[in-house]
Amino acid sequence: MTTTVNIHEAKTHLSRLLKKVLAGEEVIIAKAGTPLAKLTALPRTEPRRPGRLKGKIKWDERFWDPLPEDELKAWEGE
């Protein structure tokens, strides 16, 4: 569902509008009926947990080998 409000109403009722946004609703802010901005919720992210991928990533031992000279030059922009 989408709600459209004017700037004055958005300033006056920001908390109420944010509750709608967090509930999944889209809020459009307009000036003289012309849409100017859209309020949407940011994606929820899970807090970082160090070591979460430990043991899940495998490196090929060749990863640590020096690059061939031509590839090294390409990475260095030559």
Image (tube, grey):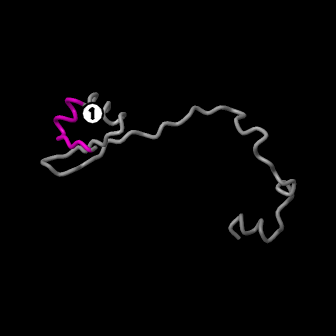
Q: Which residue is mark 1?
A: 17
Quarter of the image with the N terminus is: top left
Residue 50 rendering spot, x and y as whole percentages: 69, 32
Q: Which residues are magenta?
A: 2-13
Identity of the residue furthest to the left in this view: 32
Q: Quadrant of residue 23?
A: top left
- Which residue is depicted at the point 87% across and 53% down? 61
Name which residue lies at 77% across and 68% down.
71
Near-viewer residue (15 or 68): 15
The picture places residue 56, in percent across and down from the top left corner, at 76, 43
Left or right: where does residue 11 sit relative to residue 71? left
Q: Of helix, strand and loop, which one carries label 1?
A: helix
Above or below, 77 relative to 14: below
**Which is nearer the eye, 47 or 75?**
47
Is 12 contained in the magenta span? yes
Q: Residues within 10 Å of mark 1 (few under 14, many from 20)?
A: many
Q: Reply above or below: 47 against 2.
A: above
For residue 25, which quarter of the picture?
A: top left
Q: Position of residue 9 (x, y in %)?
A: 17, 34
Q: Nearer the viewer, residue 42 or 65?
A: 42
Disc 1 residue type? Leu
Screen quadrant of the C terminus:
bottom right
Measuring 76% from the left and 46% from the top, which residue is drawn there?
A: 57
